Amino acid sequence: MSRRLNSATIVGGALLIFGFISGYYSLQISAEADGSTGARTFPYIGAGIITLMGVLETLRGVRTAAAPLALTKRPVSIIGLMAVAIAYVWLITKIGYLFSTAVAAPLAMWMFGMRSPLGLIATAILCPAVYHFIFFELLGVFPPYGEWIDLLDILQGG
Amino acid sequence: MDILLGLATVFSSPALLGWVVLAALVGMVVGAIPGLTASAAIAMLLPVTFYMEPLSALAFLYVIGKSGRYGGSIAAILFNTPGTAASAATQIDGYPLSQRGLSSKAMKVATVSSIIGDFTGELLLIAGVGVIAAIALKLGPPELFAIYVAAFVVIGSVIGKSVVKGLASAALGVLIQMIGTDPISAVERFTFGSYDMLNGIGLVPLMIGMFVLAEVLSQIENRGKTIEQYEEPSSDEARARNRLTWTEYKPCMPHVIRSSFIGAFIGMLPGLGSAIAAFVAYGEGKRRAKNSEDWGKGALEGVAAPEAANNAVSGPSMAPLLTLGIPGSTIGAILVGVFLIHGIQIGPTLFLTSRELVYSLFAAGLVGIAAYGLIGFYGAAFVGRFITRIPTDILYPLIFLTSFVAAYSSRGSLFDVWIMVVAGFFGWMMKKLDFNPAAFVIAFVLAGGAEETFRQSLLLSDHGLLIFVTRPVALGFLSLGVATVFLRARALSREARAAALEDA
């Protein structure tokens, strides 16, 4: 990695890009008819501060030899868990809460080191049941139903 | 008088009393688990409290915050890992005491000091909050906006290693709050045509993502690391050595009293929080101590000072929240959500509209301190042993799964769950890159009020932005913000130069 491409220049660059994009979209917000302070002022100030901080951070990176960017020593674990998280939410929309939790729970346990097949099976059954009981029965939250199929529909004879 | 009525309310309601005691226990356990914080527990439990009475909900979360701060000391003393950032200073002397087989004594000192600090902070809050609220009622939009600006700047620049990243975190929080429909003109902002975005980003999923999912991501990186406890000898002689006597605790008292006031003062300033209070109190205690050479090697005073300070923060940090609507900490930011959910408007008028509720909350705080004090004094060692037996390969996946259902439960919306997932990854990245998640969240909560007062001020003004300069109180707070950034940047620059010289 080049000496100039360090954590400060990368973070500063990202802030600059974010600042510019949010500044551009702030300008798309409708202005007041009389040109006075309106809905776009605060977003524009926020974007301006982020851009300014981006400039300062980039300059720091250029002037000093900041450390190279190193986010994690376990990228596979982080990406894996995020993939499970995204897949879990997507599955809830498609197959409902019970089925998706029965898939996500053992996966999450496995990622954190559980290897017992019995434990993983128990997790797949107990987690959806317990969470469903606490949140959707006891607290009365309306459960998210799946578009394709939903165990709750089947159980309720729907 | 109000507080006596509040105490009567608490003691006459067994259910409320039960929630307070349960909160004392939950907070202590959560605070003692390395990696888990009271903020994370509160964020996760927040949706559950929507279904409770307002006072029970607020008291439950408020006491979790208090006992969570104390619980961090258990991990610091027993495992050489601070359970919370606020207990990192306790670790300096707490763990050496454990190594000498005096962990129970250290935990008793931590407990007694915590409850003295917490009671001091709570009593100062009770005595002073009415006066602050009366003053706050006289402030107009320009003054309030200047206070918001000072809060943004202090929160962004004082915590963390980098002023630039701290201020950027606060600005990001402001921008994210702007998503949705403008409450004044009903103009859409950053919605990109999405119907879900019209209502803006919910505080609850954002909090759960930033403090719970982000922590689970951090924990998966540390997978395989086991919590190690220094085994305490269980002989009669060891038990006798671990008894805490008044003669032993007496030298701690001056440090506890001083640190309690340091913590209470820092608590009133938005955003500084327990960790800073604990380190300031530790530094000040060591400077004034007769036995300063023993500090860092297992001095009981070195445990007492930071513990009194970090718990004394709790009560006074509620003052800016209740009187001005400015949360002084992440826990305060979450409590804003509880007030809003239950339809209670925070700010100076709170003392006119919900006076009984406020003082009952303070009373619940006092009862909560006594509860965690009793549980901690007699059961902290047991809590420590219990934590070493919690299998992390089950605990963190369960927290992971709970974060999804908790985020969904806040508004029954899967969009909120997506927000939580994005916020979780974003929060993890922020921590990794030395940004400031606390500044981000507090700024997110403050931004709405700041924008409203800014626009109201300009409507009042005949000379545009000059209104902020011509009003002395507003000018004072704006100057405070500028001075804070300048002083903090100069201090960090000096530190960097000193480090560079050492390296050379």
Image (tube, coloured by chain):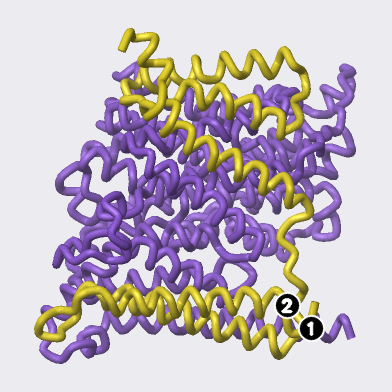
Chain colours: A yellow, B purple
Q: Do the residues labelled 2 and 1 touch (CB within 8 Å)?
A: yes
Label 1: which secondary element? loop
- Where residue B75 sits, quadrant-wise, is top right
Q: Name the residue under label 1.
A: A3
Mark 1: few, some, or many residues within 10 Å (few <14, many ≥20)?
few
Q: Residue B254's spot in the image, x, y percent?
A: 63, 52
- Where residue B342 sits, quadrant-wise, is top left
Label 2: which secondary element? loop
Q: Residue B456's spot in the image, x, y percent?
A: 16, 73
Q: Mark 2 lies on which chain?
A: A
Same-chain status of marks 2 and 1: yes
Query: Is residue B242 depicted above or below A45 in this figure?
Result: above
What amino acid is found at the position of numbered circle 1 in the picture?
Arg
- Residue drawn 73% across and 65% down? B287
> How many angstroms separate mark 2 from mark 1 (CA)?
6 Å
- Residue drawn 72% across and 12% down? A118
- Residue drawn 82% across and 22% down? B239
- Residue drawn 59% across and 79% down? A13
Q: Residue B71's spot in the image, x, y percent?
A: 62, 37
Q: Nearer the viewer, residue A45 or A69?
A: A69
Mark 2: few, some, or many residues within 10 Å (few <14, many ≥20)?
many
- Where residue A144 sits, quadrant-wise, is top left
Left or right of residue A8: residue B294: right
Residue B97 visible: yes
What amino acid is found at the position of numbered circle 2 in the picture?
Asn
Q: Name the residue under label 2.
A: A6
Q: Residue B184's spot in the image, x, y percent?
A: 15, 65
